[in-house]
Amino acid sequence: PKAASVTVRGQTIPTDPAWFNAPANVLDATSRRLHLQEDHPISITRQIIQSNFPAPTYKFYNDYSPIVTTAQNFDSLGFPPNHPGRALSDTYYINEKTLLRTHTSAHQADTFRANESDGYLIAADVYRRDAIDRSHYPVFHQMEGSMSWDRNQVPGGDVAAAVWRDIENLPKHDIQVDDPNPAMHPERNPLQEAHHSAAEAEAIGVHLKRSLESMVVDVFTRAKAAALKEDPDFVDEPLQMRWVEAYFPFTSPSWELEVYYAGDWLEVLGCGVVQQDLFINAGVPSRLGWAFGIGIDRIAMLLFKIPDIRLFWSKDNRFLSQFQGVSNNLDSLKRFQVFSKYPPCPKDVSFWLSQGSAAGGNTKGAFHENDVMELVRNVAGDVVEDVRLIDEFTHPKTGRKSMAYRIVYRSLEHTLTHKEANELHDRVCAALVNDLGVEIR
Ligand code: PHE
């Protein structure tokens, strides 16, 4: 990318050539706001999740700009300076200090600082450089949620007691949830001793788990109802869930919730007890509570049985018309009917990496697979379905490294002719040579 500045949602930001790595198609996605588009499956899924967190206890923030600072996205959350998430190979930068948010947690500190309610929910588009396949796209959507209690506002300053009273009022569900690990781990997930009593952390953990379990039960009950509408023989196995220990720099203790659905354990969300430094730095040191983050796109794929994440970006009416009316009546949710499946066009390319560096001439030194992914997406757009490494070896004498990738071209909207696929593939090969400095074999 070369422009001297970019304008995103009305804000113009100067680019720095040493950092700017966001291609036009990714920047264009910032204007789409699928999570707010009526009757779009991303928006419907957002509404379903949101319906489990009642106002006014929870306040909804659905319109934060995707342009954030490294302070918002990383520093405020306690990410160390060398954290891999900060790398140019993983994150889209505009300049050294400005980037496209990689997660909705980028807004935690600001939302705590605003201090407009005890609970909040944030829905937003997020951006990550990643692989290409049917469940990965450089733009996806997340929801962030939090609930906290103010020591100065609960009776007698007794947060644990206040939290237990609130737990009594949470919706009940009758699913047995496995929770085999101890909540705290001495290194990874210690009790925040300087700030919380064990009783407070325990109560907050229980409130967090019950709140999120109920939301997930609701989502998966709706997914099953939709599946049964279409296929009365859908294997209606009992829903199973389990909590597993996790690590995030901005929560302790931390967990992930996994759900067993249609034969697989799926990781659904990450969460934990908020690091007290976040509240302290946000000017609300007397608050304590929990936060979670959930990816919307994968949940939407399974709610509607949508086979390819690229469909969310489609403007094809054969896709969009299928969800009409659902935003206003969430119970009318039906599964997506595949309108047609066009044949895939797989093509292989193998190349030598440029000598010496075991690296291509990419954005910052060493060869990174995400550069190949993005290069293919830039040439072929949404016509690329999957890119995977099929072979890799180092020549025993010269020490040169060779890689082979299989690229599957397949349009969601029409049958690709051989000519079209070959032209795309030729352009991909030329770009590999030009931009990454590889030698085609
Ligand atoms: N931001 C985390 C992620 O993207 C999820 C998360 C949010 C975890 C809030 C804990 C608390 O993976």
Image (cartoon, rainbow, N blue to C red):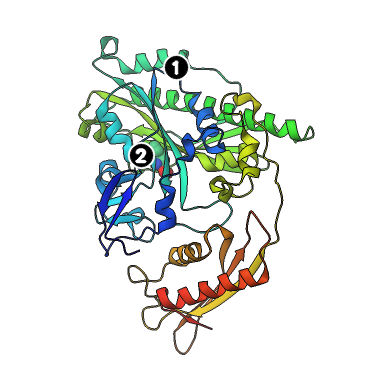
Q: Secondary structure at mark 1?
A: helix
Furthest toward the top, the residue is: 155
In depth, the one of 110 and 285 nearer the eye is 110
Q: Are marks 2 and 1 in contact (CB under 8 Å)?
A: no
Mark 2: C-beta under 8 Å from nearest atom of ligand 1: yes
Image side of residue 404 versus residue 318, left or right: left
Q: Amino acid at mark 2?
A: Ser
Q: Amino acid at mark 1?
A: Ile
Point out the quarter of the image occupied by ligand 1.
top left
- Tag 1 or tag 2, which sits nearer the N-term? 2
Seen from the viewer's position, the closer of residues 168 and 131 is 131
For this view, does 376 lie left or right of residue 6? right
What residue is disc 1 on?
167
Q: Residue at x 66, y 44 (%)?
A: 318
What residue appears at the point 68 percent right and 60 percent down from the top-left corner? 415
Of 39 and 297, the residue lying toward us: 39
* Mark 2 lies on residue: 105
Identify the secondary structure beneath mark 2.
Answer: helix
